Amino acid sequence: MSSHEAGSLHAQGRAPAWLEVPQDVNALLAAIWPAHAAKAADGVLQVGGLSVTDLAAQVGTPAYVIDEADFRARATAFAAAFGDAFAGLGGAHVHYAAKALITVGIARWLAEDGLAVDVCTGGELEIVTRGGIAPGRVTFHGSNKSDAELVAAMAAGVDLIVIDSLPEIDQLDRLAAAGGHQPQVMLRCSIGIEAHTHEFIATSHEDQKFGLSAADGSVREGVARVLARPRLRLRGLHTHIGSQIFDAQAFGHAIQRMAQLTAQVDREHGLRLTELGLGGGFGVAYTTGHDPLDPVDMAGRMAAHVEREFRAEGLTAPHVTVEPGRAIAGPAGVTLYTVGAVKSVSLGGGFDRLYVSVDGGMSDNIRTALYGADYSATLASRRSEAPPRLSRVVGKHCESGDIVVKDEYLPADVTAGDILAVPVTGAYCHSMSSNYNSVGRPPVVAVRDGLANVLVRRETVSDLLARDLYA
């Protein structure tokens, strides 16, 4: 049997089990909206004290909207939760994962609020340093770092470089010698822990591109190679087991394995490593089907695992770093769209679906097409008295898989000109956006106390042509 290119998205007539028919199609579910999002009596959504109709009139749609106060509160809550939970051990720091969402303005928030940052490209490093993050509070990741990126990181005084492969050890040593640097490093370890998430975002099983495998001896070889190069100073081991993780037990298994590897280094080299990187991957609620742990609960459970597992190996607890990105940026973001064509599609067997086309799509949110990610949506520009109808929010791109929200109950009278809002789009939407079909990328707009602050302006046709030498 041949498969349709849209895969599991094709010809599904029923709503998924987690999606219930709403009693009030106008209501917001607080768990999936920014802290400062609410609907007025007329049904108009307000974020950060500003109505989305006013905001859309000001900046247009599509638009990424970030509740600044929510973002910053989540960041500082993570820092406080892990700082408190690990205070009696080796301490802990939160490094915001820039890949989730970073602009110079957002980097300034992080700098003001005292967070460290992890980056994985030279571009991200440039953005965060321009935003005021001190290089000594930056960790540099990446699975294929260029010479130029490593030179820039060392020249800037980046705190830690996370080595991802055996060849990178020689590469970094060569560049450090040429520049007279002595970088502090960690080794990223693949430890055979498979987080229960989409295979594209599960990152510590053996058959994938990241890190040194513990199973085949690459971690042991990596430690020996680094220690044989006096310019490189080994500070610890790092792992990242995946994304959208809701169960602290997955981190518990990872901590146990990392404690064993740390003890192995101690036995074989007489070196007490002082740092343990546990990555990020903390899950967020995109829909009612998700139930994430809050930072205090997650931090407390992880601290208990670290204390127990390192004590079992006869070691004192190391200093721990964690790297939340999605869990900070994701829930703080909302994307606004304007509705265009609306059509009813009969699926047979008594089922039909309302297809609601919007003025964006997979160029501003690739996650639905790439991962089969689930999102929600609400009619944001008015109140409706129409009954709920099973709908699919689709984009304007020339792809059948150009879907923003696979399944949602929207008012049956949704029509052209309405504004839809899709929550939990702060992470990986702007950062993974593209110019597919030569569409300009949306602006990033921070809202707070009724005021809008454009962090990144809308991309124009002139921007698209700027690199075209024949234009």
Image (tube, grey):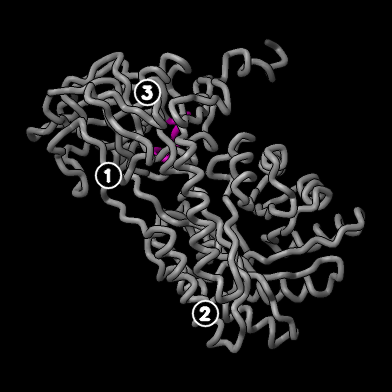
Q: Is residue 363 within the magenta segment?
A: yes
Residue located at (69% from left, 20% from top): 467
Judged from the image, the secondary structure of the residue bearing numbered disc 2 is helix
Mark 3 closeness class: few <14, some 14–19, many ≥20 residues within 10 Å: many
- Taking 47 as reference, is 18 above or below it? below
- Magenta: main secondary structure equals loop
Q: Which residues are magenta?
A: 362-369
Mark 3 / mark 2, whichever is N-terminal: 3
Q: How many marks?
A: 3
| Residue at the farthest front position | 449
Taking 163 as reference, is 291 left or right? left
Which tag is nearer the camera, tag 2 or tag 1? 2
Q: Is residue 83 magenta?
A: no
Residue located beneath label 2 in the image: 307
Look at the image and tell me whether residue 445 can be seen.
yes
The disc label shown at residue 288, or none: none
What distance separates the C-alpha of mark 2 from that of mark 1? Answer: 53 Å
Q: Amino acid at mark 3?
A: Val
The residue that mark 1 highlights is: 1
Q: Residue at x 72, y 71 (%)?
A: 222
Amino acid marked by disc 1: Met
Q: Residues within 10 Å of mark 1 (few under 14, many from 20)?
A: few
| In the rendered image, the vertical position of residue 296 relative to residue 86, given as above or below | above
Residue 357 location (% of width, % of height): 31, 22
Q: Is residue 315 above or below residue 450?
A: below
**Quadrant in which residue 247 is drawn:** bottom left
**How many angstroms separate mark 1 from mark 3 (CA)?**
46 Å
Q: Nearer the viewer, residue 191 or 349?
A: 191
Question: In the shown orientation, is residue 443 left or right of residue 368?
Answer: right
Q: Which one is in front, 18 or 468?
A: 18
The kind of secondary structure element at disc 1 is: loop
Secondary structure state at the residue bearing disc 3: helix
